[in-house]
Amino acid sequence: MKKIAILGSTGSIGTQTLDIVREQGDIKVTALAAGSNIGLLEKQIREFQPKFAAVWDEKHAQELRTRIRDLDVDVYSGMEGLIAVSTEEEAEILVTAIVGMLGLRPTVAAIKAGKNIALANKETLVTAGHLIMPLAKECGVSILPVDSEHSAIFQSLNGEEGNRIAKILLTASGGPFRGKKRQELMNMQVEDALKHPNWSMGRKITIDSATLVNKGLEVMEAKWLFDVEPEQIQVVVHPQSVIHSMVEYEDGAVMAQLGTPDMRLPIQYALYYPKRRPLSGKRLDFYELSNLTFEKPDTETFEGLSLAMEAMKQGGNMPTVFNAANERAVALFLDRKIGFLEITEIIAESMNQLKYREHPSLEEILDTEQAAYEFIESRWK
């Protein structure tokens, strides 16, 4: 029986991971960590009977302990709790579905503990890819992508060992505002930005899709995952979200992975790699597919992607500035304190103002994150 631990069990990726656990019936969940949804976490603990669980806030931990006092499950809190989950002795795979840079230290701890990583936390590689990938190699650990696009690339690379990649074609749906110009985006509200046309995702990542910041983060992640240069990654807007990404080889052949927009597929592929297992759900019907279209991304209107490319070009701690500024700006937008276009304005201003570090250590990455938060707090309330 395969044994896994999950960081972020009550979020979109975490709950879909547990859907797979239910359906397959041969995975044991040894530890769970979640945010503030204590009611759902309690239900998950009662159903899956992990050895222990963790939440960030100690008050929530106390509430959870009270709720499950009839169970033999230990409850931890804070970073200590997240690291305890990520290094749980029996788990073979850690699913990192936690949002934000909070997942960085637990992921490092898991790698050092010899756990394979099913990676859904983009920030880990965006901010610390120069540390994570060498560490994984040193520890003999696999980093298995869970994002649909990176999973598609990973699948398109299967069986092609030794063949040179010419280009990675990273597809994007274009989000809810595809085709709109800046003037049309000025008055867009939270509800508008959360109406993704194809995917069911968490609130933060859905906003990131609307700004194309998410695609920028994925470009940075792909650079580290697949050991390619930035100029080898091309973003292609594909509104139907049928082709999840492609790889072009030096002979001109293009391998693509197609499927319905269902996050359970890449999650399950990461959990069982290299084996494929049956999975319920809708299948592609090629008789029903009227057309597949492709467009260049509009980086003048959606500056999130161009800012990400600039951050990647600069390297050092600039991807951390980009990511941290976006996290805080999206939070302000969701709280209705700023407008939609101000998200990328805050990112650009943060990249212009914060100190550059060429080869940041883990501590310097976390210091950069804090500096970005403090800068934004001083300018935008």
Image (spheres, rainbow, N blue to C red):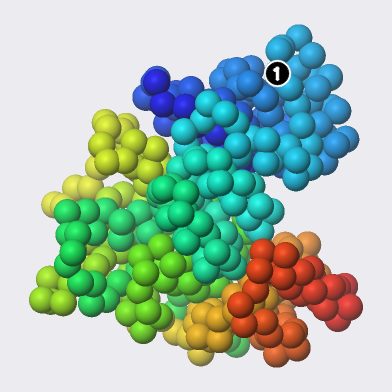
Residue 184 position in % (x across, y down): 58, 82
Total numbered circles = 1
Q: Label 1 crowding class (10 Å Cα cut-off): few <14, some 14-19, many 20+?
A: some
Question: Amino acid under label 1?
Answer: Val
Residue 222 position, x and y percent, is: 41, 67
Residue 200, relative to residue 22: is it above or below? below
Name the residue nearer the viewer: 115 or 59: 115
| Horizontal side, residue 333 vs residue 27: left or right | right
Residue 286 versus residue 380 in the image, above or below? above
Residues 233 and 361: in front is 361
In depth, the one of 72 and 241 nearer the eye is 72
Q: Name which residue lies at 77% across and 69% down.
A: 367
Image quadrant in which you'd find residue 373? bottom right
User: Which quadrant holds the N terminus?
Assistant: top left
**At which x and y percent is residue 163?**
17, 67
Assign a secondary structure to mark 1: loop
| Residue 8 x/y as whole percent | 62, 42
- Residue 56 visible in the snapshot: no
Q: Quadrant of residue 179?
A: bottom left
**Which residue does the numbered mark 1 point to in the structure image?**
73
Identify the residue at horizontal 37%, vertical 79% (top origin). 229
Q: Residue furthest top?
A: 70
Residue at 58% from the left image edge and 49% from the top image edge? 107
